[in-house]
Amino acid sequence: MRVLGIETSCDETAAAIVERDADGRGRILSNVVLSQIDDHAPYGGVVPEIAARAHVEVLDRLIGQALHEAQMSLDDIDAVAATAGPGLIGGLIVGLMTGKAIAMAGRKPFYAINHLEGHALTPRLTDQIDFPYLLLLVSGGHTQMVLVKGLGDYERLGTTIDDALGEAFDKTAKLLGLAYPGGPEVEKAARLGDPARFLLPRPLKGEERLDFSFSGLKTAVRQLATSLQPLSQMDVNDICAAFQSAVADTLDDRVARSLALFRRRFPDVAAPALVVAGGVAANKIIRDGLQRLCAEHGFRFIAPPMALCTDNAAMIAWAGAERAKQNAADPLDIAPRSRWPLDLRSAPLIGAGRRGAKA
């Protein structure tokens, strides 16, 4: 089975073709991603209107490129999958409407995919792992610990009660005058800094619940930076190193408790796995700490290639291929959802409002 995937939930426009064989193994035939970072950099963050217009301008070309690289035409596609949420509503509309049009014109089944489910199922494409497993999703928009029990069966063990970790990195970078996106810039500065010079808070560390919090850490960085004005380059480097150290310690504490919970819940799983996804997973200090933690607890550490950790369409196509096994095609009148929790049973920890729970 060959699935065309489309991803337009934020500031990457992406199209991909993924094939699932009779044994359930996946293969990426093409995976094209066009980033909008340069468009948003002058504003220090993603501007929704600019993002939506950029998707409109390039999506058809990227789909054509994905088909060309896979040496296929639309007639060779068996199904279409597109991100329907969560994300920026303008971008979601662009991708969803395009996917629906292709599916309708070609009489193909259509799958509206939860972006978070795409991340959750990626290790089954790259590493063929079995359910259940743990997923730590750390990105600009989400920070969650999820128990992946089966296709469509997800339990949120913990989530951020305020800022996502990627957002905290970006805002810290902005406070210190570093470029956007902030994650790589903070990591680069931290390599030259002394993490012991400043002691920053470790939010929720030691608490039994598995949630995350980063707004207090961000506030501490702002207060520290203000007290040191004007900042020298050494000050910036040391603050970044202290911030990164605090983040790593916080994640280690939350993840260690999650690994212990998994062991209690699933004592018969012989080779349990922790999967890490999202752009923040590229951070070497964070990744090294999680690898060490997994080794100490007897867990496999699985991090998909970076091209599949960040937003991409291959994960959307694969989620569609997995859903196709259940013959669970969606109607063409399905609407995009700017907010769409992966675990619909969990109570929202961030204000729901009229559009529903954020996470």
Image (tube, rainbow, N blue to C red):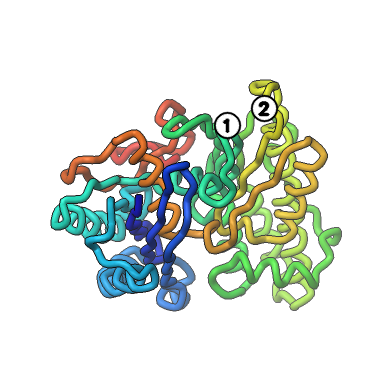
Disc 2 marks a residue whose amino acid type is: Val
The residue depicted at 75 percent of the width and 42 percent of the height is 294
Q: Which residue is mark 1?
A: 132
User: Is residue 69 found left or right of 197 in the rendered image?
Assistant: left
Disc 1 marks a residue whose amino acid type is: Pro
Q: Is residue 344 above or below residue 135?
A: above
Q: Which residue is mark 2?
A: 269
In the image as oriented, which residue stretches furthest toward the front? 22
Q: Is residue 167 visible?
A: no
Q: For the residue carrying disc 1, how many other residues have a C-alpha within 10 Å: few (<14), some (14-19), or many (20+)?
A: some
The residue depicted at 80 percent of the width and 72 percent of the height is 192
Q: Is residue 117 visible?
A: yes
- Picture disc at residue 50: none
Q: For the residue carrying disc 2, how many other residues have a C-alpha within 10 Å: few (<14), some (14-19), or many (20+)?
A: few
Q: Is residue 348 above or below residue 288?
A: above
In front: 256, or 183? Answer: 256
Pointer 2 and pointer 1: residues touching (CB < 8 Å)? Answer: yes
User: Is residue 157 found left or right of 319 in the rendered image?
Assistant: right
- SS under mark 1: loop
